[in-house]
Image (cartoon, grey):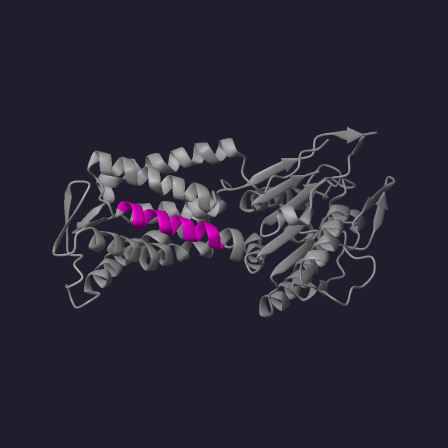
Amino acid sequence: MGRKPNSQMPRTMKIALSAVLTALGVILSPLFSIPMPPIKAYPIQHCINAISGVVLGPFWAVIVATMIGIIRNLLGTGTFFAFPGGIFGGLVVGLVYKYLWRNDLSALTESIGTVVIGATVGYAFISGLAPGEVSYVLGMPVRGVSSTMWGVSGGMWVLWLMFGASSIPGSFLGFLCLKALRRAGVLKTVSEKISTQNGRPNKPNFSYDELRGKKVLIQGDVGSGKTALTRRLLLEALTIEDPSDVAVIDMAPEVAVRNGVIIGGKLLNTPDERIRVLNVNSYTPRLTAKSPEELLELADTNRKRVEELFEAFDEKPSRILFVNDVSIYLQRGDLEKLLGIIDKAETVIANGYYGEGLKEDLGTGVSAREKSLMEELARRMEVVIKL
C-alpha cells in the first residue's frame, strides 16, 4: 500500500523540532534579551512562539515556551515573566492556525496571546502575590507592577507596553522566518506512493480533509493518475466546503493519446455551475509542433492565455483553489507569478507533469526549464505527492 500523506507531523519529528527550538531559545537568550525591569524583553522567544505555533501546534508550542522559560530562569537569563510572556503567545498562534486560519499570517497573532493575555495574567499574579511596589517571585524582587502605579491599573499598562515591545517585532520576525523556511522547502511533507500493481500505481488513499489548509502539489509522469486524483479531491472538497469558495484554474489541453497513453484532459468532464472555473484552450507544444520555432510560439501562447486566468483570479480570489496542469505554464511562464496566485488561496491542490514521457522538445530547452521549475515549485509547496 502507498503511504498516506501525513498532514500531521510525526510525533518523533515534533519532539526533535521542539528540542531544537528550545535549544535556540536558551542559547540566544544571553545575546538578545534586553533588561526592561521588571522583565527581560526577548523578541527571539516570540519568534520561536510564532514558528512553533504554526509548525508544531498549540500543545507543543506551550511545551517549547515552558521549557525555554524554565531553563532561562535556572541560568539567570530570564525572569518569572518568561512564562506568561511566552506560553500564551505560542498557544494563541497554535490555536488560530489549527482551528481558524491556516495561513502563516497567524504568526502575527502571537502578540495577542503575549500582550493581552500573558501580560494581564502576569500582572494579576504578581500584584496578588504581594501588593505594593515590590513583589518577590522565586526569591527575586520584581518592581514596577503595583496596582497604585499610574492609577488603579497602571502597572498592567506598563506590562502591556513592555510585552508589546518584545512581542510585536518578535512575531513579525517569526512570520518572516516561516516564509523563508517555506521558500527553502524545509517545511514540507513529501508523500511518495511507491507500490504498483500490474506495472501501474495503486489507487491513492489520500483524502481532501487531510490536505485541507495546505499548499499541495501532485506530480508524476504521463498516465500516472494526476488528473484523476485531483478530480477526486475536488469532488470530496465539494462535499465539505461551500462550493462558492472553490475555484478551478484549468490549464490542461484536451485529451490526446500517445503510444496508448492518455495525455492531458480537463479536470471536470461536465460543467459544474456551483464552482468558478477559469478555463483555457491550451496547446500541446511537444506533441504538435513541427519546428523549434513553432514549439516556442505555442508555449508562449499558452503562457499568455494562462496569465489572463491569473489576472481574473487575482481580481477575485477564492479561498480554495484547484489547478490542473501547472507544468504547461512553466514551459515558458513565470514561477513567481504562479506562486503569487497560490498565495491568494488558503487551500491549493495543483498537479503537473514531472517525468520522462514527454522529454523531446526539438532542442528548445522547454523540457529542461519545465522540469527545473517543477522542482522549485515542489520545494515551495507544503505537501508534495509523487505518483
Q: Nearer the viewer, residue 52 or 146?
A: 146
Location of the C terminus (image quadrant):
top right
* Vertical placement of residue 108 versus 4, above or below: below
Q: Give residue 58's position: percent from left, percent from top.
A: 45, 46
Q: Residue at x 20, y 55 (%)?
A: 127
Q: Nearer the viewer, residue 79 or 27?
A: 79
Which portion, as a residue range, is magenta? Answer: 82-96
For residue 371, side relative to residue 290 (left or right) = left
Task: Answer with the quarter of the image where residue 203 lies.
Answer: top right
Q: How many marks?
A: 0
For residue 289, side relative to residue 133 (left or right) = right
Q: Give residue 242's position: percent from left, percent from top.
A: 67, 63
Magenta stretch, main secondary structure, is helix
Task: Answer with the quarter of the image where residue 140 lies.
Answer: top left
For residue 217, side relative to residue 268 (left or right) = left
Q: Residue at x 26, y 60 (%)?
A: 160
Q: Residue at x 49, y 40 (%)?
A: 186
Q: Give residue 327's position: percent from left, percent from top.
A: 67, 49
Q: Give residue 245's position: percent from left, percent from top.
A: 65, 64
- Residue at the extreme bottom of the image, as rendered: 315
